[in-house]
Amino acid sequence: MKIIRITLPALMALTAGIQLANAQQFNAYYSVGTAMDSSSNTQIDTFGTGSPFTTPRLGGLFSDFGASVMVKQFGVGGDISWRDTQGAYAGLNYRPIFYNFDAIVQPVKTKHFAPELRLGLGGVHMGYSLNQTACNSFTGCSTETQTLGGSEHFQVHAEVAARLYVTDHIFVRPAVEGHWVNDFFQFGSNWVPQLSIGVGYSFGSNGE
């Protein structure tokens, strides 16, 4: 998808810049969790049949990939988070993608514990598609997915996380996030909390 093609190279560029910047530490992680929002309770007659759909709540399993560069107690980072499977939205399929770039403060640090306070900006992409089944006497039935485009939203991102080191390089990363999404009319609130836990690796080591 377009957002992934833009964001993942940005994270890779962040990785490549570590050696140039001679940063003290580079961290990369993968997490799983969920993002939550209420339903807007909007009735949408998507196909003009007279039987409208009620818009759903936001939920489901989310994956998150991120990276950060730390120089002493300050740093920068970014991540991208997406719903692992498409959800049902008023007769269509949908998949949200959250992406952000943050400033990071690390108030304290020990050999096994490094908390992160993050604040940044980003966006949300809401993509839609439709599954259509066609049948004929020669090839039988097949289902095709038609991409229907999507909408873009600006977001402000805040996060409290911690790197809990199990070795000098490998860490477990619990995180609590909040997304304020501008005009997130697809759901019931502009505020989207997200919970996740992941594993990661520190290049440069914890304290080296």
Image: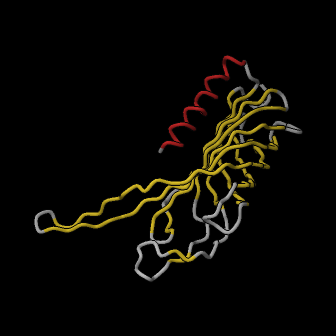
Residue at screen point 61% across, 23% down: 16
Residue 66: quarter of image: top right
Asked if 177 appears above or below 24 in the picture, the reply is below
Asked if 87 appears above or below 122 in the picture, the reply is below
Asked if 20 appears above or below 29 in the picture, the reply is above
Residue 200: quarter of image: top right
Q: Residue 73 in the image: state x and y as whole percent.
A: 85, 32
Residue that sits furthest to the bottom in the current view: 50
Image-based side of 34 in relation to 117, left or right: left
Q: How many marks?
A: 0
Asked if 108 appears above or below 124 in the picture, the reply is above
Q: Residue 163 in the image: state x and y as whole percent.
A: 75, 43
Nearest to the observer: residue 136 or residue 72: 136
Image-based side of 16 in relation to 52, left or right: right
Could you tell me which quadrant the C terminus lies in?
A: top right
Residue that sits furthest to the right in the current view: 108
Q: Residue 45 in the image: state x and y as whole percent.
A: 47, 76
Image-based side of 102 in relation to 144, left or right: right
Image-based side of 130 in relation to 108, left or right: left
Colour scheme in the image?
Answer: secondary structure
Residue 21: quarter of image: top right
Residue at screen point 41% across, 73% down: 47
Residue that sits furthest to the left in the current view: 138
Nearest to the observer: residue 40 or residue 70: 40
Residue at screen point 71% across, 61% down: 190
Residue at screen point 67% across, 23% down: 18
